[in-house]
Amino acid sequence: MDSLPELFASNRAWAAKITARDPAFFDRLSRQQNPRYLWIGCSDSRVPANEIVGMQPGEMFVHRNVANVVVHTDLNCLAVVQYAIDVLRVEHIIVCGHYGCGGVQAATETRPLGLIDNWLRHVQDVAEHHHQMLAECRGDTVRVDRLCALNVLEQAANVCRTTVVQDAWRRGQRVTVHGWIYRLQDGLLRNLGFSALSVAEAAASYTAALKRIASSEAD
């Protein structure tokens, strides 16, 4: 039975490299988890959360799913957000999508894909909500990339609407929600202009970010 020996070999090489550089690294890592950030991103294998921001294991708490969607009935995501805020006491929640997202692309197509069509319905809802802005795009690639950005904005707004985040804000806990997007072609993050530390900030920041996306300044 094949147990993927090449991955075990790579793991041993990686652990040895880390230990040679910092002999106490794994002992220290095993004793605490104290991240300041929660990253909600796409499951795409080309977007490794802590690596693209130059962080080590233990410095960022991570939740990923297809197309970085935040749904109010998704108890998996909500449990991660609750644990991050109430137990880990993170200070920042970053919703990060990426241009050229396969999930977002699939949501724009009519061919059936099976079970995942139910999940991508949430992205299609975003597309329908911003139909006019997407209709103004020239070409399919530009349209999909704009939908990727709009999807990040809507999911960041959804984070702000969760009872977990709103409860934290009501009791005065400083948790800032951000909306970012990543471009695979150059490895750089873009700030979509959404950053909120309160319900009022979320509303104002949403409007500003929407204008920024419409004018393509986020690129």
Image (cartoon, rainbow, N blue to C red):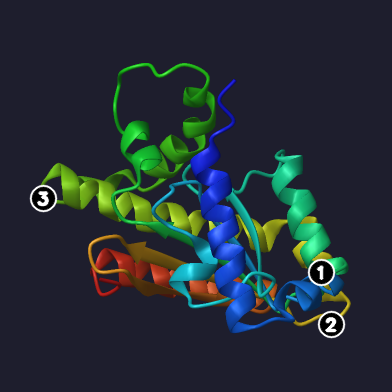
Q: Is residue 161 left or right of residue 9?
A: right
Residue 218 appearing in the image: yes
Q: Which residue is mark 3?
A: 138
In this rendering, the count of numbered labels is 3
Q: Is residue 170 left or right of residue 206?
A: right
Q: Residue at x 55, y 71 (%)?
A: 17
Q: Which quadrant of the structure image shows residue 61? A: bottom right
User: Marks 1 and 3: CB-CB under 8 Å?
Assistant: no
Q: Which quarter of the figure is the C terminus placed in?
A: bottom left
Image vertical order of residue 13 relative to residue 92, above or below: above
How packed is label 2: few (under 14 Cα within 10 Å), some, or many (20 or more)? Answer: few
Q: Residue at x 79, y 50 (%)?
A: 79
Please state the horizontal and vertical placement of residue 106, each as a whole percent of the image: 34, 32
User: Marks 2 and 1: CB-CB under 8 Å?
Assistant: no
Please state the horizontal and vertical placement of residue 206, each as a whole percent of the image: 49, 68
Q: Which mark is residue 136?
A: none
Residue 95 appearing in the image: no
Q: Secondary structure at mark 2?
A: loop
Image vertical order of residue 187 relative to residue 1, above or below: below
Q: Label 1 vs label 3: CA separation?
A: 51 Å
In front here: 184 or 136? 184
Specify the farthest residue to the left: 138
In front here: 147 or 22? 22
Mark closer to the chain start, 1 or 3: 1
Mark closer to the chain start, 2 or 3: 3
In front here: 189 or 171? 189
Q: Which residue is mark 2?
A: 172
Q: Which mark is residue 30?
A: 1
Q: Label 2 vs label 1: CA separation?
A: 31 Å
Tag 3: amino acid: Arg
Task: From the image, state whether disc 1 or disc 3 is nearer to you.
Answer: 1
